[in-house]
Image (spheres, rainbow, N blue to C red):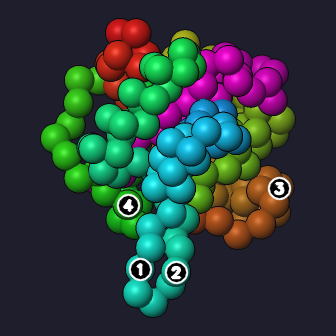
């Protein structure tokens, strides 16, 4: 698994689309809380977070913060603005973005099958599709699987249901993600 990078999420922006189990995974909170801020520094940090500029394509959208310096500036700004945040480190087989620094102190929350670009399609399918109800009691308090083996079994069943057009709403590239909460000043831990 590659350490893909950081997701900074505002704790006051919890999603509420999961009804049958507690959920604190990748899509549980709105990511990148400086989006929509009007001050110049927040706008600049958002632009740096969202886009990679290349010669061939003027802007490539990022899903993660991969640069440790940008991560530090981003979380410092959140602290300055008193935005209560959590920071997730996402690791997966997705090779499009890779964390460029040493790995921070973190607590593994579990494993989730998630599309990249990030979308709630799979986790919402897991909530409403009765064929996946047998997995609900197996989820940990974060609504994630505890082991790679458990998530791998779910992936096989999800992909079968997707191929049969029982779940999903279109093509996607999905990955098994190890989700860890980063212990930092932005999170107060």
CB-based contact (under 8 Å), mark 1 and mark 3: no
Q: How far apart are marks 4 and 3 (CA)?
A: 31 Å
**Nearer the N terminus, badge 4 or badge 3?**
4
CB-based contact (under 8 Å), mark 4 and mark 1: no
Looking at the rendering, the stretch of residues picked out in magenta corresponds to 1-29
Determine which residue is flagged by label 4. 97
Image disc number at residue 54: 1
Q: Which residue lies furthest to the left in this view?
A: 102
Q: Which residue lies furthest to the bottom in this view?
A: 56
Report crowding for label 2: few under 14, some 14 to 19, many 20 or more residues within 10 A (C-alpha): few
**Nearer the N terminus, badge 2 or badge 4?**
2
Residue 145: x and y, percent? 49, 29
**Residue at figure coordinates x 60%, y 25% from the top left:** 10
Residue 107 lies in quadrant: top left
Image disc number at residue 58: 2
Determine which residue is flagged by label 3. 166
| Residue 25 belongs to magenta span | yes
Report crowding for label 4: few under 14, some 14 to 19, many 20 or more residues within 10 A (C-alpha): some
Residue 130: x and y, percent? 82, 35
């Amino acid at each position: 698994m590659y350490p893909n990078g950081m997701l900074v999420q505002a704790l006051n922006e919890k999603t509420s689309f999961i009804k049958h189990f507690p959920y604190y995974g990748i899509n549980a909170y709105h990511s990148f809380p400086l989006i929509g801020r009007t001050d110049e520094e927040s706008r600049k940090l958002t632009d740096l977070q969202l886009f990679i500029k290349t010669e061939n394509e003027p802007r490539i959208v990022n899903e993660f913060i991969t640069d440790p310096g940008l991560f530090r500036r981003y979380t410092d700004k959140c602290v300055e603005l008193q935005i209560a945040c959590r920071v997730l480190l996402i690791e997966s087989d997705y090779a499009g973005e890779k964390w460029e620094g040493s790995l921070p102190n973190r607590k593994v929350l579990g494993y989730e099958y998630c599309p990249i670009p990030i979308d709630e399609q799979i986790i919402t399918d897991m909530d409403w599709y009765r064929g996946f109800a047998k997995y609900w009691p197996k989820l940990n308090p974060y609504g994630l699987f505890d082991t790679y083996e458990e998530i791998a079994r779910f992936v096989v069943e999800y992909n079968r249901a997707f191929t049969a057009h029982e779940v999903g709403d279109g093509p996607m590239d999905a990955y098994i993600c190890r989700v860890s909460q980063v212990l930092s000043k932005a999170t107060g831990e």
